[in-house]
Image (cartoon, coloured by chain):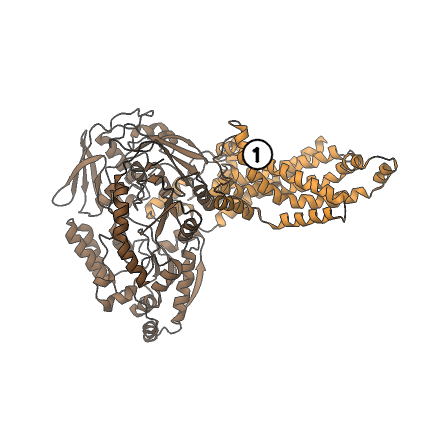
Chain colours: A orange, B brown
Amino acid sequence: MKPYVLRRLALAVPTLFLVSVLVFALMRLMPGDVATRMVEGHAYAPTLAALRHDLGLDRPVHVQYLDWIGGIVLRGDFGRSYWTRQPILEEFVRRFPVTLELALLTIVVSVVIGVTVGIVAAVRQDTAADYVGRVLSILALSIPYFGLAVVVVVLPSIYFKWTPVYTYVAFTVDPLQNLKIMLVPALVFGVTRAGPIMRIMRSALLDVLRQEYIRTAWSKGLSERTIVLRHALKNALIPVISLIGLQMPLYIGGSVIIESIFRLPGVGLFFFEALGKLDYPVVQSVNLIIAAMVVGLNLAIDLSYAFLDPRIRYR
Amino acid sequence: MARRAVVVALLLPLLLALAGPAAHAQTPKRGGVLRIAEREAPGLDPHLSISFLTHSYVSLAYSQLVRFPNGPEQKHPADFSIVPDLAEKWSVSKDGKVYTFTLRKGVHFHNKPPVNGRELVAEDVKYSLERFMAKSGFKERFEPVQAIEAVDKHTVRITLKEPYAPFLNHLANPSFCAILPREAEDKFKDFNHPDAVIGTGPFVLKSYDKGVRVVFERNPGYFMKGLPYLDGVVIEITPDAAARVSLLRAGKVELPHIWGWLSPDEAKSIQKTNPELAVVRHNVIGQGFIYMRTDQPPFNDIRVRRAISLAIDRKAWNEALLFNEGCIEPGPIPCAMKEWKLEAAKMDPAKAKYLTGFDPAEAKKLLAEAGQKNLTTPLYHWPGYVVPWRSYYELAADNLGKVGITVELKPEEYGKYISTTALGKYEKMAMGPSTPFTEVDDFLFGRFYPELPTNQSRVADAELTKMLVAQRREMDPRKRKQIVDDIQRYLADKAYYVYVPTWPQYVSHPPSVKGFQHHDGYGLGMRLAYTWLDR
């Protein structure tokens, strides 16, 4: 197990290096110039040159890259925002709990819905319940979560003079109020993400239910409940867990829009606003941190297979 | 239409008689907190950011030497006359070069460390204005300033290199001239930290939860006795526009925008779904135009430019997109700037038709004369400007197409547009709105003086240039107005910029919000100082 983990960690280094180069290059390929943007065309040439120098934008591109990546690798310094001049890591750490909570609640919602409907659809294959479940999953897949979010925010405000948008309160301050605020965004996001989980759950479970050890279980006279939940479900969950792992970047990526609509002060909003303002260091560093998290999470998910399926051993 | 106008004309005095005394009879009540939904400001330091959000946020906390009128003081939203703020009076030397300001005595900063409520003195004014001249993106506004001196504790003298008529207007602009305490910069390095926001204004910044809300409380020691009426103001940070309007509808905020603004479509929708909310229409100092490379063919030919202006059906735009509530003669000075505007009706009609007229037949004739029957041009623009801009670009292309000009719409990303096209770096033709400036000089000198980046049409007209400089140096307002009128007459048939209708702005809030008068001067603090809640 240990050599496997070390090998995977070593492989993460080139991955993250490539991510860093890509995001650095992409930011600079974006049209527009952050210095001009900061003064919105009000400044004359001398001001702009001074501002560029101040931000270090007058240095060659490779120097800028090395300065940024060097700061992270050598000093753990993720740089400062061009606009607010505040340390990025500090802001990230402050905002991350919001995004993490949203992601976790979203996963809970999508798993509860997706797995439950998936099981029912598989066990009652080709019945009305199966068809309803499959139609619902296609529907969930085809509704964009940002569209659903806007509808949920706007329509009740018109018809009931109510809106699910609140002033954010941290979980540590008032857990109940916090959950009340998080519930609607997590439901909106979770419902749309439940579609793929339900489909995978259904097909994986159908597959497992046809295997011989399940037939053996039936012949032993076990109840359906025990067979499905105790014997079949655990094996059928592996592809579902991989799917959640693969969807992890989507949960973080989706938070960008969800957070701005429901006014949650998380990492997604931080990233979204930085992107609009061409705040290079923020976009680069946030991207890199999230990439590192996704790499770490994928590893954790691979390791969890061993727990779910004792036949899997890592060497 | 005519019948409706008659009915309105007959009913209006009656309505005014009924509404007028009732409205005036109400005396403002103290208390209550006003909530505003708005995006987060990029920073809080008024000199390090040029965002209107930054300036609106911190205008609650800071004062200036002089300011624009607000609330009951203002005649209309674009009233840019100058009233005292920290300076109780001022005098200008005969040659127009020396300004002497006498400060109010006994004005104290907010009671927050490290300033701890000490008295404001002339040194603070000198420090703040010099910091503005060193750091702000707007610093060229003070380019004519030679020296700022603190003569004594309560007297500030500003010496200019040359007479400069726009100077007081710039001093009154909340985007530039907040008076800040030096100790806060010494402690916090700049004024971006919420604890560094220490001013002499009507509200005190109490707390700032990043990405969530900014809380201001009434300044009990504010130097205008009895103001503000509100106990506090809360900005609920809401990045999404649809969510802001939903918050207004659901009664969770009083203003859906830092100035209460709604787009025309949002306003019409609110009037239908929430008739209980007040929706007030204002003509604001907006302006939009097609700009062209007048230093190059084919747009150096006045016939081509006139043809473009004649091709634009301004009345139809106003009807189709602006509910007939826009202004169809918005250039070169915006309609709302009543004190400076010379209406087309007061000009020679033969010339004014090239400013506001619609005559496709003559446009075609002019193009034929200029040998440009099959003219093709790009139209650079940023599609993201608020309603009605996206439709504007398409209407322009459509109108020009009808006189034989093929327009290729060239959308650009915002960063690129604002840093190239909007600064006059483009080919042939572009289109977009103007910054709503508060000083008439910006619409004339800024747009037409050779080589300036804001001279987007790259105009270089010697006769015009002379007048542009003259109006800047004329200190007598009446004489200056004459020169400004001459400039407007001169520009009428030049078509250096082709102006398109100006859109009105809608301000919405619950009827319990009283005394909130829109003003185009970027500052929010004084607007809110006169605002009260009738609950």
In the displayed orientation, state which residue is furthest to the right: A219
Q: Quadrant of residue B176?
A: top left
Q: Quadrant of residue B143?
A: top left
On the image, the x and y values in percent for residue A174 come to 52, 28
On the image, the x and y values in percent for residue B450 come to 27, 57
The residue sitting at 28% across, 54% down in the picture is B11
For the N terminus of chain A, the quadrant is top right
Chain letter, disc 1 residue: A
Q: Which residue is mark 1?
A: A101
On the image, the x and y values in percent for residue B417 come to 41, 53
Which of the two residues, B258 or A294, is positioned nearer the viewer here? B258
**Mark 1: amino acid:** Glu
Q: Secondary structure at mark 1?
A: helix
Q: Quadrant of residue B515?
A: top left
Total numbered circles: 1
Which of the two residues, B57 or B78, is positioned nearer the viewer here? B78
Which of the two residues, B494 or B57, is positioned nearer the viewer here? B57
Quick check: A7 above or below B242? above
Q: In the rendered image, is residue B172 in sight?
A: no
